[in-house]
Image (cartoon, rainbow, N blue to C red):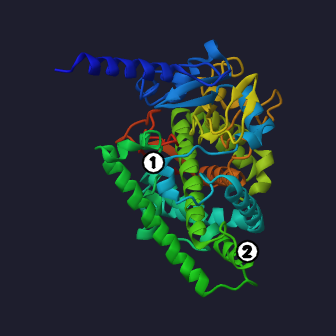
Amino acid sequence: MLSSGYIFVLVFLCIYYLFRWRRRPKNFPPGPLGIPLFGITPFAGVDMHKYLASYYAKYGGVMSFRLATKDWIVLNDIEAITQALLKQGESFSGRPQSYLMDQLTEGCGIVFSIGPRWQAQRRFVLTALKTLGMGKRNMVGIINEENQNFLSAIQSSGGKVNILSEFRKLLSNIVSNLIMGKSFNYEDEKLKAIVDHRPTSSVVMFIPFLRVIPPFKQGYKRLLASTQRVLDIISEITEEHKNSFDENNLRDFIDIFLLEMKRQNSEYFTELQLLHLVRDLFVGAIDTTTATLGWGIICLLHYPECQVRIQEEIDDVIGSAEPDMSHHERMPYLRAFIQEVHRFKTIAPLNIPHCVTEDCVLFGYHIPKSTPVMSNIWRVHNDPEYWKNPEKFSPERHLDSEGRFVPSNRVLSFAVGHRSCLGIQLARVELFLFYASTLKKYEFQVDPEYGLPDWSDDRSGTVKTPKKFSVLLKSR
C-alpha cells in the first residue's frame, strides 16, 4: 500500500497540474478547455468546424480552445479572418510546428515552411507560374487537351466510371505538364503513385506519441512510405531534366528551379527543396480541385435543373466552338454554379493552420507569439446572418436582378492573405473549362447500380472529399 506521504505528493501533483491546466496567457481570448491531456478532442468529433462554430453566439468571432495540451485560436467570422489574415497578414503568416509535418517535409517545401525559406519560395513560385503562362492561352490548351484525354478514357470505359479516381488522374497530368513538361499514360504506375498519395491531417499531427500506437502506427508508416515513393519519382524526373538542361530553353517549372539553383548558392534552392516543393504543388493542386469537382458532380446529380441551365448557356455562348476563357465573362450561371459549390461544400473547413509570428493584438485580445490559429471557413460559408437559407444549394444567390454574376469575398475557397492558394488562377481555369467542355457534349446521370450519392465525405484528411461514387456520362 502507498504511504500517506506518497498519497499526499500524488494529490499535490494532480492539483498542481489542474491549476496549470486552467492557466492561460493574460487577456487571452476565452473558450472551452475540454479535459486534461486531450482538450476538446473527445467532444469535437470529426466535424470540429461545426463544434467550434457552435460557440459563436457565446464568444463571437475570436475565441480560443485547448487541443491536446496546446491553446489554439479560431477565427469564426469574416471580420476576424479579414483583420488577422489580411490586415495583420505578416503577423499571422507562420505555421505551427508539427512532428508529422517535420518528418514528411524535412523542413522543406512551401506549405509548411516558415520564415525566410517560405518567403523565398513564395516569391519564386509566383514568378515561375507567371513565366509559365498561368491562366494564359498555352495553359488553356494543355487543360483542354487533358480534358479530351479524360473524356476518351471515360468513353473507353463505356461511360460508367469511378469519377474521383479519374479526376485525380486528369488533374495530376495537368500539373505534371506544368511542372515536369510531360503527361503520364493513365495506366502508368508512377501516375498511380502520385494519384494515390493523399497526406492526411492525422491526429498524429497534434498528438505525436500516437504514431507508435496502433492503428495510428500503421497509417503513419503508410504515409511515410507513400511520401517517399512520390519523392523518388520526382527525383528520377529531376535527374532527367538535369541531364538535358538548357538554360536558354526552359521547358517547365523544374527547369526554372534548376536555373535558380545555378544562379543562387542558397540553402533555399537545393535539390531537396525542389523535391518537396514539387510534391507540395502536386498535393495542393490535386486534392482540392478533385474534391471541388466531385462535389460539383454530386450537385448536378441532385439538382439536374442546374445541369440543364448550364448546358443551355453553353449552347448559347459557345455553340460549336472549342471552350476557352474568352467565354468566361459571358457565362454568369456557370460561374455562379461554381461559386455556390465552393460555398455549399467547404472542402477545407478549418483551412491549414496558421501560427502567430510575433506578439500581437486582435480585437483587444493579446495573442502571444507561436500561438496556432485556425480559420473557420465553414462558418463564414454558412453564416445565417449573411446567407439566406445557407443549407440550401442555390447558384441564383450569386446572380443579381439582371442575371449578372456577383463575385463574393465571403466565399473563401482559396483562403486569403499571405498563405492563400498559389494556384488560384489555374484552379479557376480548370474548373471552368472542365464544366464547359464536358457538359457541352455530355450529361452526368445517376448510376442506377450505385444510386444517388449522398453528401457525406470520406473523413480521411484536411480536404473534405466525397466518398467514392460512380456516375454515368451520356452523350447529349
Whole-angstrom CA distance, mark 1 to mark 2, is 52 Å
Q: Is residue 361 visible?
A: yes
Looking at the image, which is closer to me, 75 or 133?
A: 75
Picture residue at 69% right of the left edge, 66% below the top:
141
Regarding mark 1 in the picture, which secondary structure is present there? strand
134, above or below 395, in the image: below
Amino acid type, label 2: Gln
247, above or below 475, in the image: below
Residue 202 is situated, as x and y percent measured from the top left of the image, at 43, 43
Mark 2: few/some/many CA within 10 Å (<14, 14-19, 20+): few
Amino acid type, label 1: Leu
Looking at the image, which is closer to me, 384 or 82?
A: 82
Q: Which residue is mark 1?
A: 472
Task: Name the quadrant of the N terminus.
Answer: top left
Sequence-wise, the earlier of marks 1 and 2 is 2
Looking at the image, which is closer to me, 457 or 379?
A: 379
Regarding mark 2 in the picture, which secondary structure is present there? loop
Give the quadrant of residue 139. Answer: bottom right
Residue 236 is situated, as x and y percent measured from the top left of the image, at 50, 77
Picture residue at 22% right of the left edge, 19% below the top:
3
Picture residue at 42% right of the left edge, 28% below the top:
38
Q: Residue furthest top?
A: 58
Q: Which residue is mark 2?
A: 264
Residue 317 is situated, as x and y percent measured from the top left of the image, at 76, 49
